[in-house]
Amino acid sequence: MAKTVILHLTGEDPLLAEIEAEPQPGDQFIRVFNMRKRDGKPVSYLAAGVQAVIFPWHRITFIELMPSEEERSSVIDFFRS
């Protein structure tokens, strides 16, 4: 099952994408699918019809793993009263 991530690349705005599995410590790169800007617009430097992009780790600052709908129901959000 694909997980949605926010991908922070060095020197670029964050991007949304999907990954099939969480990265492992021994991985040399990360493969992402359905890459788009956070507002849903296409990424300008990708060719039309690109299905997946492979990034080496030195290009990635960090990755945010977003919870799925199932996981979201068990997460307690903080709020102010």
Image: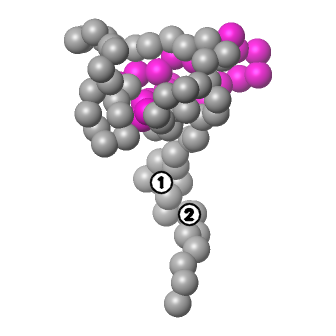
Identify the residue at horizontal 27%, vertical 27% (top origin).
Answer: 42
Which one is in front, 6 or 51?
6
Q: Gap between marks 2 and 1, in whole Å?
A: 7 Å
Q: Quadrant of residue 8?
A: top right
Residue 12, magenta (yes or no):
no
- Decide: marks 2, 1 in contact (CB < 8 A)? yes
- Identified at 23% across, 11% down, the residue is 48
Bounds of the magenta segment: 15-34
Q: Left or right: 24 with respect to 22?
A: right
Quarter-of-image position of residue 52: top left
- Residue 74's tag is 2
Direction right: furthest residue: 25
User: Is residue 16 on the magenta stretch?
Assistant: yes
- Place of residue 12 in the rendered image (x, y in percent of width and height, measured from the top left): 49, 28
Tell me if residue 61 can be seen.
Answer: yes
Q: Judge the density around disc 2: few (<14), some (14-19), many (≥20) Cα neighbours within 10 Å.
A: few
* Image position, residue 21 (x, y; %): 57, 27
Residue designated by label 1:
70
